[in-house]
Amino acid sequence: MISPTLQRAAGSLFGLAYGDALGKPTEFLSVAEIERRYGPAGPRQLVGDPALVTDDTQMALAVGWALHDAPGYTAEVVEPLLRQRFLDWAASPDNNRAPGMTCLRACAELSRGLPWQQATQAGSKGCGANMRVTPVGLLDVDLDILAGLAQLQAGLTHGHPTGLAASELTAYAVRLLCDGAALAELPGLLTGRAHEQRTVYRADWLGDLWQRADERAPEEFIARGWDECLRALRRLDAALAGPDDGGDPCRLTGEGWIAEEALVTALYCAVRHADDPVGALARGAATAGDSDSIAALAGAFVGAAHGMAAWPAEWAGRIEYADQLAALSARHD
């Protein structure tokens, strides 16, 4: 019998990949174009054998394998493993899925051997910071280590404080769902976490990153990121308080190209379709924004809540990187 822990870990990792694959062909289409192609419900079927994913899943796998190889969880141990996995991804012939320029630029700097605090794109809070953080949320570690790992993996490429905070919140959301929290509870729980952590600068994980910004103190640096996440969460609360008109959630919570918007727009899709996991993916994929990242994060959330039972059974054999997704899931049994 497969354990509930393994079911939720697998559901989350596979859900991320499924959402990524459904959103891949819609990423640069308007909502009208998506509806003409897929109907008003959006894409609900994987296409291709295998169904191809984007850099979102590729980089989540990079994070997952770096954590898998780590003999312990400290910045000194994990940073070189993340660095090497990111550089391997950057050089891979499979890195041909319209990867984000922030990640490519940061990897180019990392390849020169620079300290990551210098290599990172300090002004970027793109969703590449948190599209790949799901494996951190699946670890059985205390919340301080979870937060440090989430921020570190973001910081290697995206040095903006909002990218760090949004990544921590994304990983924390996955952890909460795996522990049994309801999807509807997440906005309030994440808001509470953001208030608690608002001035916590994790120097043991981030080093002197804050000095790349025009801030007087590390606490001011990180507070800026948490404050932007709190504003995004307030937009999410307002959107969920009203009726769902079935339209593009990007109108309410943002297009998802930046980290805090990817988080809250994915949460909107997940909460609105808590009992229809494939519908959550389709809703994320049928947006005018960063549809693959929104749908991927929605899949990670709904999959963590429901486990592999959330997804059509035949999808597991058709998604690209199925063997790696299964192998990384198995370590949580």
Image (cartoon, rainbow, N blue to C red):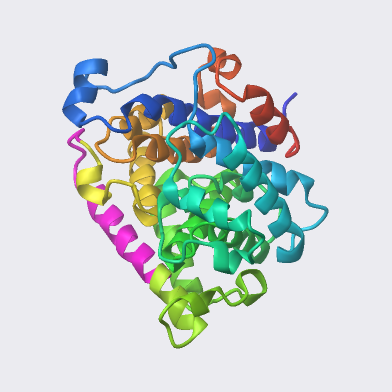
- The residue sitting at 21% across, 22% down in the picture is 35
Q: Position of residue 59 (x, y in %)?
A: 57, 41
Q: Is residue 286 above or below residue 224?
A: above
In the drawing, does residue 20 fall left or right of residue 248? right
Q: Position of residue 293 (x, y in %)?
A: 41, 40
Query: For residue 275, which quarter of the picture?
Result: top left
Of 102 and 163, nearer the camera is 102
Asked whether residue 243 is drawn in magenta, I would say yes
Task: Point out the stretch of residues depicted in magenta.
Answer: 226-247
Q: Is residue 28 above or below residue 149?
A: above
Q: Position of residue 195 (x, y in %)?
A: 44, 72
Give the residue at the far bottom of this rendering. Answer: 216
Asked whether residue 197 is drawn in magenta, I would say no
- The quadrant of the rendering that contains the C terminus is top right
- The quadrant of the rendering that contains the N terminus is top right
Q: Is residue 126 above or below residue 198?
A: above
Q: Position of residue 153 (x, y in %)?
A: 59, 56
Of 107 and 156, nearer the camera is 107
Q: Is residue 178 above or below residue 160?
A: above
In the drawing, does residue 5 fall left or right of residue 153? right
Q: Is residue 206 visible?
A: yes
In the drawing, does residue 266 fall left or right of residue 251? right
Of 99 and 278, nearer the camera is 99
Query: For residue 325, which quarter of the picture?
Result: top right
Q: Is residue 303 visible?
A: no
- The residue sitting at 61% across, 25% down in the picture is 321
